[in-house]
Image: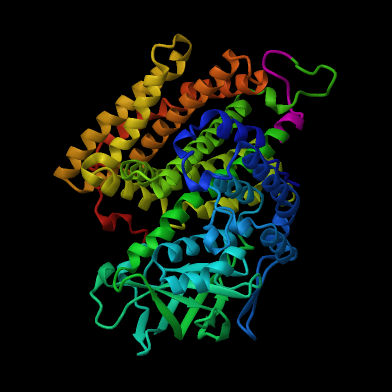
Amino acid sequence: MPTYSAPLEDFRFLYHEYLDLEPCKPLATMADASPDVIDAVLDEAARLAQEVLQPINAVGDLEGCRYEASDASVVLPEGFRTAYEQYIGNGWTGLTTDPEYGGQGLPSFVGLALSEMINAANPSFSAYPGLTHGAYEVLHAYGTDQQKRRFLPPMVEGRWSGTMNLTEPQCGTDLGLIRTKAEPTGDGRYRITGTKIWISAGEHDLCDNIVHLVLARLPDAPSGTRGISLFVVPKFQVDTDGSVGERNAVKCMGLDHKMGMKASATCEMQYDGAIGELVGEENRGLAAMFTMMNAARLVTGIQGLGMADVAQQNAQRFALDRLQGRSLDGPKHPDKSADPIIVHPDVRRMLMIGKASVEGARALGLYTGVQMELEHHHPEAEVRENAGHWVALMTPIIKAYFTDIGSEVSNLAMQVHGGAGYIVDTGVEQFVRDVRITQIYEGTNGVQALDLVGRKLIAHEGRTLAAFFQHASRLLDSIGDDADMAEFSRPFAEALQRLQETSKWLYGEMARDPLEAGAASSDYLRLFALTAMAFVWTGQAHAARRALEGGRGRARFHDEKLATARFFFARMLPDTVALDAKIRAGAATLMALDAEQFRAD
């Protein structure tokens, strides 16, 4: 059966040696975030993931969720409720939330480590607190003072959970097609009527109440996305004093049967005149919901990262133990019947791709987490704005590339296992099934690529795009003419120049023909992602070298970090050359066939 060990040494390297937390020091969220506190959080999160959540992951996959038609309830697999009670009992739901509502107020980049660990250990479980946190963020940003007082404390405690209800049978990405209605009742509330599908954590037995955030249309609302409003619709109505009242007219009509993530309840929700309250302004609901969507997209990226890590760990362990064949340059273990498969170059290729992908993504995710903290809390408007540009730019990249990594590394882990990986008992095939949805939900990766090209590339007159190059230039300036860093800084600088030139070329082509944006988008996102990975690998290599040269390095760990960086620059970054060529090939060959020529019959 698979196992999981939290990557504590790598987290500590990133928090204490790689990341520059100095700009965050004045923030209120940093008041209690000393290195010792961060380490304590990491240790306890690791224990939770390894000892509580990972052991019930396979159980959740085997049992799945059970729908009880008699009362439209959903029962989670054995052990999930006990694990959740322990999770909220130890205060994890309030780790990074506002102390005014009962939270601990630690910085969001500390919460990202928790998110990675619990997603690696049990991605189905992570859906419940993850969605609650997203709903909390929307209400915290857009709710009235009364709504915040009533809804946020029990959500922070974990006694209530949260969801987001966007998708309907006739619309997914195109939310302008939403039909769910919101009729005013005359007392400031609304009756919500409609059907929502694919609602994660829409019904379950973990909490006393479920707070649904629902997109719906007011009477006479404008058509399209300009006529969508956002409503908070709890499973049990909440009185003005915060007490729970009668059951609302919302219920789960059934569960979807899925390829993976089987312990995450994916529900069809029916609203039959359910009482709701407006959140934010009328007809501005999509903007409010995107607060949750953008947070969810970053967390989904971290989910892909965590699932890649657990798959990678199990592949490494198997490669060290599995005996098969002899090394091409002679036996490495002549006392055994065969060598472990880790001696074979192609196995090493797969393992190194996984290792470089996971460690690079972890660094990029946490670096972005620091920028999120600056965006939300720094007292200077210019700092907030610049950090916001970085976060906006990286959101589609992290969501798409990290989940692509999750699927690729999980598939490589299965390949390393050979036939054993295809067998349920090893647990590796569950990684492949579970992670696949991350490339689809919270906006497909194709949609993320279109967002990057169609919006972020031109946003704020180019200032959003420029944010990445500013960070990159500062890093290269700090390295200067350090000859020992040239093996990293030189190819990074070349990739950076390639990205600049390709971005300029694509901008011009988009103006000439909008189809060029769609044709280039996925390849451009990957080109950008690999360049961003080069940025963090250059920074990690620089940090590792400084530690070794200063005599304070853990030689084995830092040498390993440098070796992995070398692999990335030699074997992965060169893909940007091919991606550049594919981008410049344009839309012509993609669009050459008539649509009817794709018809199979």
280 w.r.t. 313: above or below: below
Quadrant hosting residue 246: bottom right
Q: Residue furthest top?
A: 483
- Residue at coordinates 47% horizontally, 51% vertically from top-left? 439
Q: On the picture, is 528 further left or further right than 219?
A: right
Give the extent of the magenta segment: 318-330
Q: How many marks?
A: 0
* Residue 140 spot, x, y in % from top left: 45, 63
568 above or below 153? above
In which quadrant is the C terminus drawn?
bottom left
Could you tell me which residue is drawn at 39 percent across and 84 percent down? 190
**Residue 518 visible in the displayed image:** no
Residue 302 shows in this picture: yes
Q: Which residue is drawn at 56% across and 51% down?
A: 435
The answer to whether residue 280 is above or below residue 41 is below
248 left or right of 481?
A: right
User: As drawn, is 464 to the left or to the right of 400?
Assistant: left
Secondary structure that dominates the magenta span: loop
Question: Would you place residue 38 above or below residue 196 in this image?
Answer: above
- Can residue 319 be found in the magenta stretch? yes
Residue 490 place in picture, x, y as percent = 39, 17
Give the x, y percent position of residue 584: 26, 34
Q: Name, please, the residue furthest toward the left.
A: 512
- Colouring mode (rainbow / by chain / secondary structure / one colour): rainbow
* Residue depicted at 63% across the width and 75% down the height: 208
Toward the viewer: 168 or 108?
A: 108
Task: Please provide percent x and percent y for residue 215.
Answer: 38, 72
- Residue 433 included in the magenta stretch of the image: no
- Residue at the far bottom: name it: 186
